[in-house]
Image: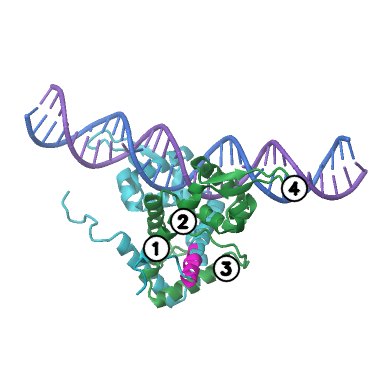
Chain colours: A cyan, B green, C blue, D purple
DNA sequence: CCACAGGAGTTGACGTGTCAACTCTAGGAA
DNA sequence: TTCCTAGAGTTGACACGTCAACTCCTGTGG
């Protein structure tokens, strides 16, 4: 039997090839989509994510914690991003001194118009570079694999749905 | 949400679900691998990429342009990265005033020892989070899809090995 | 010789992302 | 009341990445 050092084995050429191809594809795809948003809409992917999330929110207003939860970003990341986007005029922090003093995050007019065009552009790019290239079998494989991996790294079921507090 | 438009329409729920799952999986995977390198080896993915590339180079020494080509990174990115890694003691820029004045980039002892352990750790993590979770069908689908996408976005058969994830 | 184009590499400004430390407020116990 | 805790949000330090402008050298033509 071979030495039991599964963790201390480098990748076989075939394994490496698969890993390398996947990494490269993934990197090229995200790069292309980022550039598309920047070129056609003048916003970054991070800005797009925030804008869409706010746009879909009931009342078009959320708190930092909700944004953080919804985007699966750290709170400090959200806060930094909001600062930059506030400086660029896409969002505004509105104080609510009353019942809960937390600041609400809302879209500005500029943010609203940006997200409306960006959604269409981005959807087109996702089709062009991702969806249109998938055979049904590949789509199914990707879907299954993504689900497995998400379940493994970030198991669902502890989403805190009914913990009453 | 939006009225359906002929050319730039938003994604159908099923399409969105696939895209979202893929993006999330991809993000979780790279995050996990990054953290693994940082936790177990004390280096970042960017540092790992540079170290491995230098380590595999004949003579363990390259110039910035070669690194840039090999990693498929912009030269300025390489330069910034080398500055940070030089400060951390992983690489050194050696002057060659003579025939070509270009600076050669070499590994320090610290860099050499770091890369040797990191290669094993990283390979183990790639197995754990990626390779071991793939059925043969999924592996084949991923391989085919990656190839198609790379060919579409970067049609050159540019032999640039990827940045080692 | 000087001028100048062009490539290699660097630098600065800025946006992005993580980690740890911090402020501010509310709620509970001594 | 005062102290302690805990959560929401912010900030600072630093690493990463892109873009454009810059330096330095070299080769070519006047």
Cα–Cα span, label 3 and label 4: 41 Å
* C20 horizontally vs A18: left or right: left
Secondary-structure class at tag 3: helix
Q: Dot 4 corresponds to which residue? A: B99
As drawn, the label of residue A8 is: 1
Q: Dot 2 corresponds to which residue? A: B116
Q: Dot 3 corresponds to which residue? A: B152
Residue closer to the observer: B124 or B165: B124
| Residue B123 position within the rendered picture, expressed as x and y whole percent measured from the top left | 42, 62
Residue A140 drawn above or below residue A123: below
Pair 3/2: label in front: 2
Cα–Cα span, label 1 and label 4: 42 Å
As drawn, the label of residue B131 is: none
Q: Are discs 3 and 1 both within one chain?
A: no
| Magenta stretch encompasses residue A14 | yes
Q: Residues within 10 Å of mark 2 (few under 14, many from 20)?
A: some
Secondary-structure class at tag 1: helix
The picture quadrant where one finds residue B117 is bottom left
| Residue B110 position within the rendered picture, expressed as x and y whole percent measured from the top left | 48, 47
Secondary-structure class at tag 2: helix
On what subunit does the disc labeled 1 rest? A
Cα–Cα span, label 2 and label 4: 32 Å
Q: Are discs 3 and 4 both within one chain?
A: yes
| Magenta stretch encompasses residue A73 | no
């Amino acid at each position: 039997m071979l030495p039991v050092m599964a963790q201390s084995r480098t990748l076989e050429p075939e394994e490496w090839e698969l890993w390398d191809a996947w990494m490269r594809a993934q990197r090229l795809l995200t790069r292309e989509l980022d550039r598309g948003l920047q070129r056609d809409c003048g916003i970054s992917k991070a800005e797009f994510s925030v804008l869409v999330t706010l746009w879909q929110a009931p009342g078009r207003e959320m708190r930092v914690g909700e944004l953080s939860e919804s985007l699966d970003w750290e709170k400090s990341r959200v806060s930094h991003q909001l600062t930059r986007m506030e400086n660029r005029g896409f969002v505004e922090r509105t104080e609510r001194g009353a019942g809960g003093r937390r600041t609400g995050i809302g879209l500005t007019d500029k943010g609203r118009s940006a997200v409306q065009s960006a959604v269409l552009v981005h959807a087109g790019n996702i089709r062009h570079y991702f969806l249109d290239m998938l055979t049904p079998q590949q789509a199914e494989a990707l879907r299954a694999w993504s689900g497995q991996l998400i379940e493994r790294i970030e198991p669902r079921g502890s989403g805190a749905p009914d913990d009453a507090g």
